[in-house]
Image: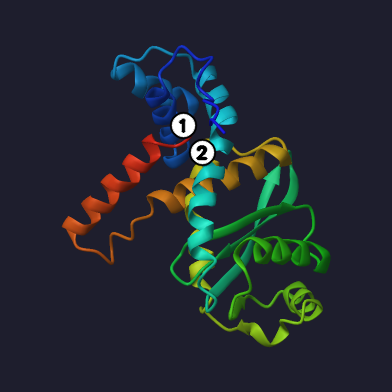
């Protein structure tokens, strides 16, 4: 079956579209910042075009990245997950962004809910386990919802709670917080869920762990990530 080209009805080249989406999602830039950066490269577009592109093509790119990575990551059965939730304001109402991170800092799942009770924790854990399999250890904070949810799915013995041991999940919120400030927060829960899923996939794709690699190895991994990005959704 021939793969459909999602760019077939667009006059702009796929390379420009991929570049605009990457700049907007990966870096803490506004739509108008991306418009100005592209203008310096001789590409004249409106900031609303950037908004349309990331809304249309962003989920496609994120889906392909997750599909390519999930099949490899699921094979590791001895994972240690770090799970945490953070407060997010939408139109002066408080919501909760749940996030699961593995032992290497890979963002596995992001999920937005109105509450942080047992039902919300259970839905989040089941969604993550369905995609990535069951972890060996689940590191959480002292929120009672985690204990109740893990007990219901017969994984209470996998929970670990302690001071500072969940810093990996806490630190995983920082790139999103920087991006949230640049976007001047969100106005709908659907927009938040859509963006965090895309942001997590792009962050994982370009996270080359430069603090663990030599300069030469980091440059090779960075070039490979950019080459893979340029091939996303290619016909």
How crowded pointer 1 is (Cα within 10 Å; few <14, some 14-19, many 20+) is rated as: many
Task: List x then y, in percent, for residue 73.
Answer: 50, 64
Residue at 42% across, 24% down: 14
Quadrant in the picture for residue 126: bottom right
- Of callouts 2 and 1, the N-terminal one: 1
Q: Secondary structure at mark 2?
A: helix
Q: Name the residue tied to disc 1.
A: 21
Which secondary structure lies at badge 1?
helix
Residue, disc 2? 61
| Residue farthest left in this picture | 216
Give the farthest residue toward the bottom: 157
| Measured Cα–Cα span from mark 2 to mark 1 | 9 Å
Determine the residue positioned at 50% across, 71% down. Answer: 167
Kindly give the residue lying farthest to the front in the view shown. Answer: 1
From this viewpoint, is residue 177 visible?
A: no
Left or right, residue 221 beside residue 141: left
- The image shows residue 220, relative to residue 137, as above or below, that is above
Residue 6 visible in the displayed image: yes
* Residue at screen point 37% across, 26% down: 15
Q: Residues within 10 Å of mark 2 (few under 14, many from 20)?
A: many
Placement of 145 over or under 192, stated as above or below: below
Residue 173 percent coordinates (x, y) = 53, 57
Quadrant of residue 166 within the rendered picture: bottom right
Residue 207 at x, y = what percent?
38, 54
63 or 85: nearer the viewer: 63
Question: Label 1 near label 2: C-beta < 8 Å?
Answer: yes
Report the quarter where the N terminus lies. Answer: top right
């Amino acid at each position: 079956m021939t793969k459909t080209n999602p760019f077939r009805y667009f006059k702009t080249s796929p390379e420009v579209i991929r570049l605009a989406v990457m700049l907007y999602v990966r870096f803490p830039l506004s739509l108008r910042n991306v418009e100005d950066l592209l203008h310096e490269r001789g590409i004249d577009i409106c900031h609303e075009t950037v908004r349309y592109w990331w809304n249309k093509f962003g989920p496609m790119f994120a889906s392909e990245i997750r599909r390519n990575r999930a099949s490899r990551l699921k094979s590791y059965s001895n994972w240690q997950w770090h799970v945490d939730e953070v407060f997010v304001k939408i139109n002066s109402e408080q919501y909760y962004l749940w996030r699961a991170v593995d032992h290497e800092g890979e963002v596995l799942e992001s999920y937005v809910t109105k509450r942080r009770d047992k039902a919300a924790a259970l839905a989040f854990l089941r969604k993550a386990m369905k995609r990535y399999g069951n972890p060996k250890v689940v590191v959480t904070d002292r929120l009672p919802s985690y204990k109740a949810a893990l007990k219901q799915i017969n994984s209470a013995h996998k929970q670990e709670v302690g001071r500072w041991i969940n810093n990996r999940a806490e630190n995983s919120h920082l790139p999103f917080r920087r991006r949230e400030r640049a976007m001047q927060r969100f106005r709908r829960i659907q927009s938040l869920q859509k963006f965090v899923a895309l942001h997590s996939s792009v962050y994982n794709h370009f996270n080359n762990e430069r603090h663990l690699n030599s300069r030469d190895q980091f440059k090779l991994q960075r070039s490979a990530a950019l080459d893979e990005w340029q091939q996303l959704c290619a016909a």
